[in-house]
Amino acid sequence: MTNKSGFVSIIGMPNVGKSTLLNALIGQEISIVTSKPQTTRNNITGIYTKDNIQIIFLDTPGILKPKYQLQNLMKHEIQVSVIDADIILLVVDSSKYDSSSIDEILADFKNDLNKHASFCILNKIDLVNKGEILHVISDISRKYNFTEIFPVSARKGFNVENLLDYIIDKLPEHPFFYHGDNISDQPVKFFVSEIIRGAAMNVLREELPFSVCVEIEEFSEREFGKDYIKAKLILDRESHKKILIGKDGRMLTKIGTKSRIKIEEFLQKNIYLDLFVDVKENWKNDKSFLRTHFKKQNFIS
């Protein structure tokens, strides 16, 4: 039986459910999910392998007009993901449908969408009645030229299997790119740092979560006892440090507890997690810091 294998880029505005869709397609939690927009900062690779099929999914940051250097890097990640994609999934929040958001995306990515099979994914249909969904599908069909339009609820798993079948149908014949046991090409420390950042984003409020980046300083597997992980939470303002640590260290402890539980679930082993806080003023606009941080954490090549 001939193998089919290819790359699928998942793009869209912030908070439309791209990461939830990736996790639903893969069948396990690869990408962190929060209720806050701009959660994903870099391309997250999730690999689906079954029988003679392998799909390399790329969950990308939300598309927006960059206001600082971090967002420029995020936009570059999206551009990289669509260049060699075999299929592009443009995800739209059907509960907040506005065709101008599609127009905005097409302004930057129309050529890429025209070069590849492109599916418009209407996510969150569990929040919309049938009549509204039919109206949205009709409007998109009239205005745009997508290969397919798919209504799904990634959160509830509705129509995800059908979407997967259509993706498989459009895949080229090609040998597998990765070993069949791989679920991602990113290292363990990447996922550990993402779990910690996800815990911080869920615990912290207002603008503070977007000012946090995480670096794994040490990851030591021990023959006896718990594995040791030392992680640094970096903020861009000194004034945020007290907020993140909290009174008597309670906030940092809460983040640490949530992180440790999820990391232990991910690694299937007990760990000792050592968190500390540092400040790098205005790191989101510091090109040198961003290059060093993202390469150090294996976020980009």
Image (tube, rainbow, N blue to C red):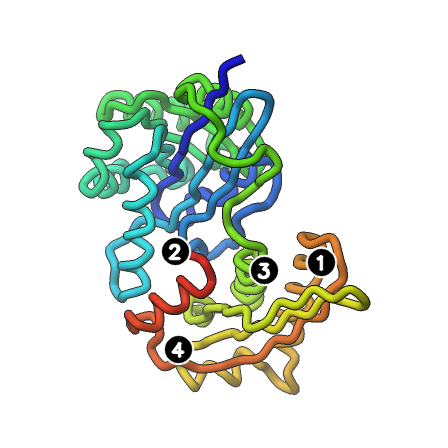
From the viewer's side, name the closer residue of 83 and 242: 83
Spot the residue most to the top.
1
Which is more toward the observer, 164 or 239? Answer: 164
Q: CA distance from mark 2 to mark 3?
A: 16 Å
Q: Given the image, on which type of amino acid does mark 1 rest?
A: Glu
Quadrant in which the N terminus is drawn: top right
- Marks 2 and 3: which is nearer the front? 2
Mark 2 or mark 1, which is nearer to you?
Answer: 2
Q: Going by the image, does 8 lie left or right of 142? A: right
* Amino acid, disc 2: Ile
Q: Which residue is mark 2?
A: 300
Q: Nearer the viewer, mark 1 or mark 4?
A: 1
Identity of the residue drawn at 25% across and 59% down: 66
Q: Earlier in the sequence, mark 2 or mark 1?
A: 1
Q: Earlier in the sequence, mark 4 or mark 3?
A: 3
Q: Which residue is mark 1?
A: 264
CB-based contact (under 8 Å), mark 1 and mark 3: no
Q: Residues within 10 Å of mark 1 (few under 14, many from 20)?
A: some
Q: Residue at x 48, y 36 (%)?
A: 124
Judge the density around disc 3: few (<14), some (14-19), many (≥20) Cα neighbours within 10 Å.
many
Label 3: which secondary element:
helix
Q: Is residue 67 left or right of residue 239?
A: left
Residue 236: mark in rendering = 4
* Of marks 4 and 2, the one in the foreground: 2
Mark 2: few, some, or many residues within 10 Å (few <14, many ≥20)?
Answer: some
SS label for mark 1: helix
Tell me the distance, in whole angstroms, between the alpha carbons under discs 1 and 4.
29 Å
- Pointer 3: what residue? 192
Q: Amino acid at mark 3?
A: Val
Where is 90 relative to 240, above or below?
above
- Give the label, 4 or 3, closer to the camera: 3
